[in-house]
Image (cartoon, grey):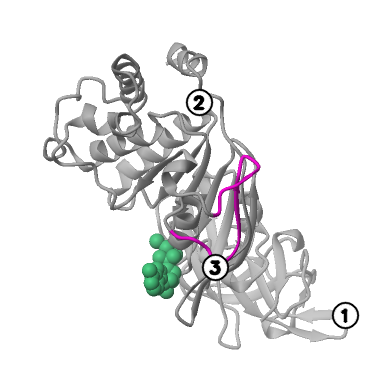
Amino acid sequence: MVALGAALKGGGLSGGASVALEAVTKRYGTETVVAGVSLAIPAGEFFTLLGPSGSGKTTTLSMLAGFVIPDEGRVVMGGQDMTQVPPRGRGLGMVFQNYAIFPHLNVAENVAFPLTVKGAPKAEIQARVAEALAMVKLTGFEARYARQLSGGQQQRVALARAIVAHPRIVLMDEPLGALDKNLRFHMQVEIKEIQQRLGMTAIYVTHDQEEALTMSDRIAIMDGGRIAQMGPPREVYEKPDSRFVAAFLGEANLLDVTRDGALVRGPGGGAIEAGAGQGTTLFVRPEKVTVSAAAPSGGPNQLPGQVLHASFLGNVVRYAVDVGQGATVLADAVNGPGAVLHAPGAPVTLHWRAEDSRLLAA
Ligand code: ADP
Ligand code: MG
């Protein structure tokens, strides 16, 4: 595999190219589906557009691909303005969820397709198809047709076809959407490995937050045609700027707090200290909240409450704790050595560190 990677690099592969969108807008009728999106992706980055259905991910990717021309703004690749360049002239690799492989062509012919249409020499096509199939671990499947392949194998063929021409940029729109969970995980690892080995710039679309967190160098979270927040996985997960981002990226406690001059008070009146922010919604992830049978000791970020539910998930116990005033806090406790289970009805004290929490706008 190492030798193969080296051979591909020697064979004219030159890593990734940078990609930028500059204030790009797309309207359909009166609806603005992408609203002034700007982003700059350095060469070789794995960049993910994450967001709910209808947030404008596919439209954004389609403008990068050249299938959709923006009403305003510019698309720049490798420093060149590509806004008006048709898809074929952009030299991209693409994998789409519903961009199935051609049923009338076998695996080798499917993978060869981008080179065949370019009229590449036969020997070169053969060598590159063999390389691409080895990368997706489908050597030996050359003569099969789509109907003789599993869903995962078909997606691997689509991936091989996307990389066979050694593109500097690969666009992927929910490529694993049709696969079951185990296969998804397996393919996530493979896609990431191939992308890193070839040094390609990858722009990936998904609505699955775990997939985005595991695969990406940076994530842009889209909401209503805009980028709500952009950053490395850990940053957007741990330091969301809004309720929307906090809730979209996983379980989040979002508690109403009140301000009393410089003091912030939680449900029940306890003092709150937060890591950052100015709003009146307190954000803290369940895994950052500890549950203790001891009474509050008087410090900040201690909420007395009563266990409502204790869900035993095996490695983790997820507590829902009633902290008064109709508010419930979720707390995940690792089921580690000597872990104590707090039964429903038990009085407990919740605690978290100031730096693990933020105040968001309501
Ligand atoms: P996502 O991929 O995040 O689910 P899309 O980019 O596909 O979102 O769509 C964003 C919005 O734009 C949706 O409301 C969708 O209905 C609308 N839309 C997308 N393509 C078209 C089109 N060709 N004509 C009209 N509306 C469209
Ligand atoms: Mg889509």
Asked whether, in this view, residue 80 is left or right of residue 110, the answer is right
Q: Position of residue 245 (x, y in %)?
A: 58, 66
The disc, 2 or 1, on the residue closer to the chain's N-terminal end is 2
Magenta residues span 68-83
Asked if marks 2 and 1 touch (Cβ < 8 Å), the reply is no
Residue type, numbered disc 1 = Ala
Residue identified by numbered label 2:
197
**Can you say whether 336 is above or below 6 in the image?**
below
Tell me the residue at 29%/40% (across/down): 155
Q: Quadrant of the N terminus?
A: top left
Asked if marks 2 and 3 touch (Cβ < 8 Å), the reply is no
**Quarter location, residue 273:** bottom right
The disc, 2 or 3, on the residue closer to the chain's N-terminal end is 3
SS at badge 3: loop
Label for residue 71? 3
Task: Mark yes or no: residue 252 visible.
Answer: no
Q: Nearer the viewer, mark 3 or mark 1?
A: 3
Task: Mark yes or no: residue 6 visible.
Answer: yes
User: Marks 3/1: CA distance?
Assistant: 47 Å
Residue type, numbered disc 2 = Arg
Residue identified by numbered label 1:
262
Q: Quadrant of the C terminus?
A: bottom right
